[in-house]
Amino acid sequence: MERTEVVINTHNRGEVQLFSDDQKVGKMDISVIGQKLTVYHTEVNPEHEGKGFAKILLERLVSYARENDLKIVPLCPYVFAQFKRHPEEYNDVWLKD
């Protein structure tokens, strides 16, 4: 069973973490400064690739941003590609500078 956690440390850096059967299988490196959430990198363990886990991480990231009135800066190539491919899903949280 999959579960996600958003972990922000005291230096405004953190991760969106994905667990499957209590094993960490993926993460997104993020930072939150003010109302801006920057996502730098998405990673899924090689043995778990192709199972839709990156999409689960993205959904959790977007939910977290919406819950906290944050705008996302998608520096991560995966997140940027998803935002460009599906702008109707993400326009409300996508910070386009």
Image (tube, rainbow, N blue to C red):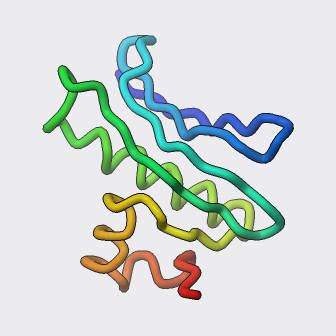
Decide: is 73 above or below 6. Answer: below
Quadrant into which the N terminus falls:
top left
In front here: 8 or 67?
A: 8
Q: Residue at x 53, y 78 (%)?
A: 94
Q: Is residue 51 left or right of residue 61?
A: left
Q: Pick out the residue farthest to the top.
A: 22
Q: Is residue 78 left or right of residue 46?
A: right
Quadrant into which the C terminus falls:
bottom right
Decide: is 67 above or below 69. Answer: above
Q: Is residue 49 left or right of residue 36?
A: left
Q: Quadrant of residue 16?
A: top right
Q: Residue at x 36, y 74 (%)?
A: 83
Residue 56 lies, in percent from the top left, at 36, 45
Q: Residue at x 42, y 58 (%)?
A: 76
In front here: 48 or 97?
A: 97
Q: How many marks?
A: 0
Residue 12 lies, in percent from the top left, at 78, 47
Q: Is residue 57 left or right of residue 29?
A: left
Residue 32 lies, in percent from the top left, at 73, 56
Q: Quadrant of residue 22?
A: top left
Q: Residue at x 36, y 23 (%)?
A: 25
Decide: is 43 above or below 85. Answer: above
